Image (spheres, rainbow, N blue to C red):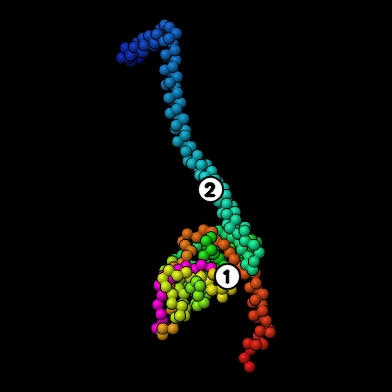
Amino acid sequence: MRKLIEFIRSIYVVVLFVVLEAAAIGYYAHSSSYTQARLLARSNQVIGGVHGFFAGIRRYLFLGRENRALAQRVASLEEQLAQYQEAETAARLDSYMQNIGESKYRFATAAVVGNTLNRMQNLITLNRGRKDGIEEEMAVLAPDGSMVGYVVACTERYAVAMSVLNTSFRTSGKIVDTDYSGSIYWDGKDPNTVILGELSKYAEPQPGQEVVTAGLSQYFPADVLIGWVESAELNETKTSYTVRVRLAAEMSRLNEVILVADRDRYEIRELQQSDQVEQHTRVN
């Protein structure tokens, strides 16, 4: 009991102060409507601050979940955007061909979904396949009509083309407005240039001259733009030129392509392989 009395004596001043303060605040609060309004506004401000503090803590604790939900939403929107962009690309590419009438060539369009540039055997993957009318041996052109490659394999939904930047690529080419043709191939060095080899010495190529397809290949129509003469040199025997041609197609920025099929190529091939032709080519 003595200790309790001593404890009360040690804190009675503080207790008395708190009681008097509470009485003073109570008296002040009820002294007028103005003071009541001020105290109510201040108490609401304090309570609001406390609630805001704890709300901020709750938001922080659930921030990871909100970020995951936001990331899922962004991924969904990105997928929708990709679908819209693909549809827009297909519509734009198809519009390139709307005014082309019936001819010996059949046209289709596709978007590039894969394109290698840093290998010796570069390939281009397209987002259309057999169900879209794409087939092997179709020529692949850039949107401006310049040469890019030709299709070598197809599935129902996709196709793979051999890029002009492939050391196995071969087609025929010539200097525009001349009758001298040679073989177009890539030597694996510069991804911006190809070689026009075995060109007659009488062609006399000059820098800046346009190089086009000769129409002797089963893949490309005649006069498809390949590029421009960059340099030329005669071989050791002085019988033909090796011409370096700067490509017209920007292979590193290839997003959309036009595909061309010769409607007559199967008929021509069947005729060339017919028994009648073999009779005249058989060695006696």
Farthest-out residue, bottom: 284
Q: Residues within 10 Å of mark 1 (few under 14, many from 20)?
A: some
Q: Quadrant of the N terminus?
A: top left
Instruction: Look at label 2 and name its amino acid.
Output: Glu
Image position, residue 26 (x, y; %): 41, 9
Q: Magenta includes 30? A: no
From the viewer's side, name the closer residue of 256 and 125. Answer: 256
| Of callouts 1 and 2, the N-terminal one | 2
| CA separation in Å, label 1 and label 2 | 39 Å
In the image, which disc is placed on residue 203? none
Position above or below: 34 against 179: above
Q: Quadrant of the C terminus?
A: bottom right
Instruction: Look at label 1 and name its amino acid.
Output: Pro
In the image, which disc is placed on residue 221? 1
Position above or below: 24 against 79: above
Image position, residue 24 (x, y; %): 38, 9
- Is residue 140 at all visible to an observer of this figure? yes
Q: Secondary structure at mark 2?
A: helix
From the viewer's side, name the closer residue of 134 and 69. Answer: 134
Residue under circle 2? 78
Residue numbers of the magenta segment: 224-236
